[in-house]
Amino acid sequence: MSNADFELTGKTALITGAGRGIGLATARRLAAAGAHVIIADYIAENGEAAAAEIESMGRKSLFIEVDVRSSASVDSMAARALAAFPQIDILVCNAGIAQAVAAEDCSDEDWLNMLAVNLNGVFWCCRAIGKHMLERGSGAIVNTASMSGMISNTPQPQAHYNAAKAGVIMLTKSLAGEWAGRGVRVNCVSPGYIGTDMTAEGMANADWYPTWLAMTPQGRVGAPEDVAAAIYYLASPAAKYTTGSNLVVDGGYTAW
Ligand SMILES: NC(=O)c1ccc[n+]([C@@H]2O[C@H](COP(=O)([O-])OP(=O)(O)OC[C@H]3O[C@@H](n4cnc5c(N)ncnc54)[C@H](O)[C@@H]3O)[C@@H](O)[C@H]2O)c1
């Protein structure tokens, strides 16, 4: 193994939810390693700004507006990406939402919307871009799961989020097994609490935030860059013997 195994020059990555937070940090990280990066998000303003920033780093970029809840929208994202770039080498399925709601008050709409973004969305993207990777016999997919797929968060109630993320971990393993013999690796990362827009409400909550810190051995939340580094490793040739894994980046939360 050499530093060349961490080199992404000439490769193209597509990242969903890359307009801000963990997705944006990942776009910057992969671009710094040499990759061209396609930014996919449903907030156009953030996505356009992210694509401009990647171009300012000397890489090619493109913003594609997508709603990952819709397989038609995802298929059209894949078609647009492959019309603009000859191939997609790396797919990061990272778009996600969070919501705190007690299970007994969780409406059909809340439940279905959570599953639509956080689980269906990952599958639609893996299926659309995975097909292209299988045809070429090469590709690396990294899904953003969560420690919430392994532990039940507290004090905020979020059964639908936790269930969706557990689904992402098992979807990752299932696809890894199906596609390992055809050159496509599929892994996921499971972040603990990371300081982004998603956690801003919780970090401002006088009950939740101290509980999160007390339950985290490192006693702090992580940065988006901490997760981006793990995604980078799994996406890079350095991880060529790694598939079906779930890399936990949680300051030790799940160790206690
Ligand atoms: N922040 C954390 O503590 C934490 C912990 C574990 C896992 N995660 C996961 O990491 C991922 C990124 O989260 P983040 O913290 O950066 O949050 P964020 O809210 O800052 O970013 C999420 C991004 O996804 C996009 N998005 C949401 N719904 C979409 C849809 N239907 N179609 C397309 N794009 C959509 C948003 O526009 C946004 O740019 C999510 O999957 C989240 O569940 C976050």
Image (tube, rainbow, N blue to C red):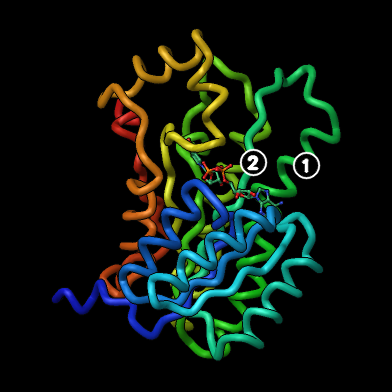
Earlier sequence position, callout 1 versus callout 2: 2
Left or right of 117? Residue 207 is: left
Query: Observer-nearest residue: 55 or 175?
Result: 55
Q: Residue at x 27, y 76 (%)?
A: 7
Query: What's the distance in space between the residues labelled 1 and 2, CA to CA?
Result: 9 Å
Ligand 1, image quadrant it occupies: top right
Amino acid type, residue under disc 2 in the picture? Ile
Q: Quadrant of the C terminus?
A: top left
Q: Residue at x 45, y 17 (%)?
A: 209
Residue 162 image offset from top left, x and y in percent: 59, 34
Query: Observer-nearest residue: 137 or 9?
Result: 9
Query: Observer-nearest residue: 82 or 190?
Result: 82
Q: Secondary structure at mark 2?
A: loop
Residue 230 image offset from top left, x and y in percent: 34, 54
Q: Quadrant of the N terminus?
A: bottom left
Give the residue at mark 2: 97
Other residues around mark 2 within 10 Å, as few (<14) / some (14–19) / many (≥20): few
Q: Residue at x 30, y 33 (%)?
A: 251
Left or right of 251? Residue 167 is: right
Vertical relation: 18 (above or below) 224: below
Q: Does the residue at mark 1 contact the one at mark 2 (Cβ under 8 Å)? A: yes
Q: State whether label 2 is within 8 Å of ligand 1.
A: yes
Query: Observer-nearest residue: 175 or 209?
Result: 209
Residue 134 seen in the figure: yes
Q: Residue furthest left?
A: 2
Give the residue at mark 1: 113
Q: Residue at x 46, y 68 (%)?
A: 54
Vertical relation: 104 (above or below) 27: above
